[in-house]
Image: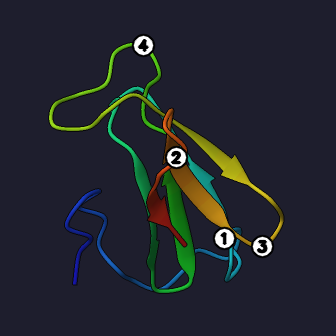
Amino acid sequence: RSSPVTGVQTCALPIWLRPGTILAFGHIHTPVAEQSGDLFFFNPGSAALPKEPFPPTWGRYDGNCLEVVDFEGDRKSVV
C-alpha cells in the first residue's frame, strides 16, 4: 500500500523510526498532513509559490494535531 500524495510505501519501520514519528519535509510546495501506518508525513505547502491547485498554505503542530491551513484560516489537511 502506498500514500496517494507522497507515494511512500507502507513497510516495517527501521529501528530508528518509532511509531508516531513525524517526518516533516518541504521543497515540493504541496501541502501534506497524512498518516501511513505508524508514521506521519507533514509538509506545510508554500506561502509564496504554491503548486496548482493548492492555495498558499502554512502548517502547525500543537503537540496533538498536524494541520495545513490556508491564509483564510481554512484547514486543508488535518491528522
- In which quadrant is the N terminus drawn? bottom left
Residue at 39%, 28% (x, y): give it: 56
Quarter of the image where one finds residue 8: bottom left
The CA span between labels 2 and 1 is 27 Å
Q: Secondary structure at mark 4?
A: loop
Residue at 32%, 39% (x, y): give it: 30
Residue 28 or residue 10, whichever sits in front: 28
Q: Name which of mark 2 and mark 1 comes first in the sequence.
A: 1
Q: Residue 2 location, x and y as percent? A: 23, 75
- Residue 7 is left or right of residue 73, and the answer is left
Residue at mark 1: 17
Q: Name which of mark 1 and mark 3 comes first in the sequence.
A: 1
Q: Residue 17 location, x and y as percent? A: 66, 70
Q: Amino acid at mark 4?
A: Ala
Q: Amino acid at mark 2?
A: Val
- Residue 73 is left or right of residue 16, and the answer is left
Q: Which of pointers 2 and 3 indicates the residue nearer the eye?
A: 2
The CA span between labels 2 and 3 is 16 Å
Q: Name which of mark 2 and mark 3 comes first in the sequence.
A: 3
Q: Name which of mark 4 and mark 1 comes first in the sequence.
A: 1
Label 2: how many Cα within 10 Å (few below 14, some 14–19, many 20+):
many
Q: Name which of mark 3 and mark 4 comes first in the sequence.
A: 4
The CA span between labels 4 and 2 is 14 Å
- Image height check: is 54 above or below 74? above
Residue at mark 3: 64
Hey, which residue is sitting farthest front in the picture? 72
Q: Secondary structure at mark 2?
A: strand
Residue 40 or residue 79, whichever sits in front: 79
Q: Secondary structure at mark 3?
A: loop
